[in-house]
Image (cartoon, rainbow, N blue to C red):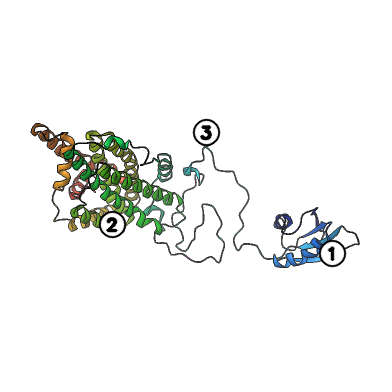
Amino acid sequence: MTARRLDAAELELGGGLEVLLVAALEGLAPGGRIEVVSPSRATALELHGWARRAGHRTVGELMPDGGPYAVVVERGPTARVLADPIGPRREPPPLRAGGEFHSADLRDGEPAPGVAGAQRGFTPVRAVAELGAPSFHWALNDRDALWADDVAELAEQATRAQWDASRDVPWAAARDLPDHMERAVAQVMTFIAQNEYAALYVPAAFLPHVNPAYAEVVMWLAGHIHDEARHIEVFTKRALIGGYAGQALASTELSLKTLLEERDFSGAALLLNVLGEGTFLDLLAFVEHHAPDAATRAAAHLAHRDEVRHVHFGISHVRRRMAGDPDQRASLVAAAERRAEKLVEMSGLSPLLGEGLTIMAAGSLQPAELAEGARAVRDLMQTMEDNRIRRLQAAGFDLATSTHLSELHTPNLM
Ligand SMILES: [Fe+2]
Ligand SMILES: [Fe+2]
């Protein structure tokens, strides 16, 4: 068998020659040979040991006085990695306008796998897994139980829409509100911050169970969690910036605890994304509209922008899930009913929250304005209900079921 010649020139082992050798040997079938020529006798002698350690062998040498020296290396039968080959170079994924590589194009139009092996490790999209890795035991291995058609695009939007709760809110504007107004705002902000924790803990609880094959879902959930961390931050800061604190209500805790108890991903998407965050969209719009200061307004506005995305994911996921599996409809309704049963003792909006919202909408403690504020809060409740029904219909429920689910929804709003 003739050997290909490889001129090592001044390269030494440990100084780059091994990289050249590996590249040359990988191009050969087992048994293929290369003749390595070096002006260094020491390098030539070292090649024997290197070849053995790398799973190859040397099958001849030529060591004339004064050099150059030649050693023939024969490729061994073992692969460096216990895996299928990488495969030929393919047409790379497409780029969008401006040279952008979107997450939606990661798979270049191929769908994510319908089912992923529960044992599979952290194998990136298209990567070939080496054998002998430890087994994992993921719980969420079914694409349709996790997916939304626009999940990659939504994760992309989340990255693009990041903001900074320390700098992007004009905090100084919230320093000097009158006492009664500051107390009201602090209570409403505390209530919102309390709920934002649950909005973070729910996706965070699912994330470590998602099969890594669904990179888009992992990225989406991580972005969702990050958004909620900032919501906790911005509303906690707004609660405190005026010098007061609010009450963390027990009824809110009860409601949020039942949200965390939902173990089905689609059930949680319905309860949190569609119903809870959907209802919060209306609450945040109300707070933005009636904010007594620019900091409160900015905080509500920025969080609302993120919530639109979270609600969109929920609607998109639930609609796809029910379309693909008609039995899901009954399971999802049952999830909402189960939760409502745990909350039977709750009735209506917490008085503390209702009062805070009323004062914000009234703008003062003048009787005429308070009456106006109370009406605005009643209108808000109606808007929330109308929009919940509309969103549930967008998610694929008929009007009667949507109305039923909306009525079951927690008086805590989230
Ligand atoms: Fe949030
Ligand atoms: Fe959210």
Q: Position of residue 261 (x, y in %)?
A: 27, 59
Q: How far is the residue under mark 1 from the one under mark 3?
A: 55 Å
Q: Residue drawn 39% across and 50% down?
A: 221
Q: Which residues fall within the magenta stretch?
A: 131-135
Q: Is residue 8 above or below residue 389?
A: below
SS of the residue at dot 3?
helix
Quadrant housing residue 299 = top left
Q: Residues within 10 Å of mark 1 (few under 14, many from 20)?
A: some
Q: Is residue 57 magenta?
A: no
Q: How far is the residue under mark 1 from the one under mark 2?
A: 70 Å
Judging by the rendered image, the residue that carries numbered circle 1 is 61
**Three-letter amino acid code at the position of disc 1:** Glu
Quadrant housing residue 166 = top left
User: From where the camera sits, is residue 382 visible?
Assistant: no
- Label located before the other in sequence (1 or 2): 1
What numbered label is drawn on residue 371? none
Q: Residue drawn 16% across and 39% down?
A: 180
Q: Position of residue 280 (x, y in %)?
A: 25, 43
Asked whether the beta carbons under mark 2 and mark 3 sit within 8 Å of each other, the answer is: no
Judging by the rendered image, the residue that carries numbered circle 2 is 260
Judging by the rendered image, the residue that carries numbered circle 3 is 98
Q: Nearer the viewer, residue 411 or 327?
A: 411
Q: Position of residue 338 (x, y in %)?
A: 21, 58
- Label located before the other in sequence (2 or 3): 3
Q: Residue drawn 21% across and 43% down?
A: 399
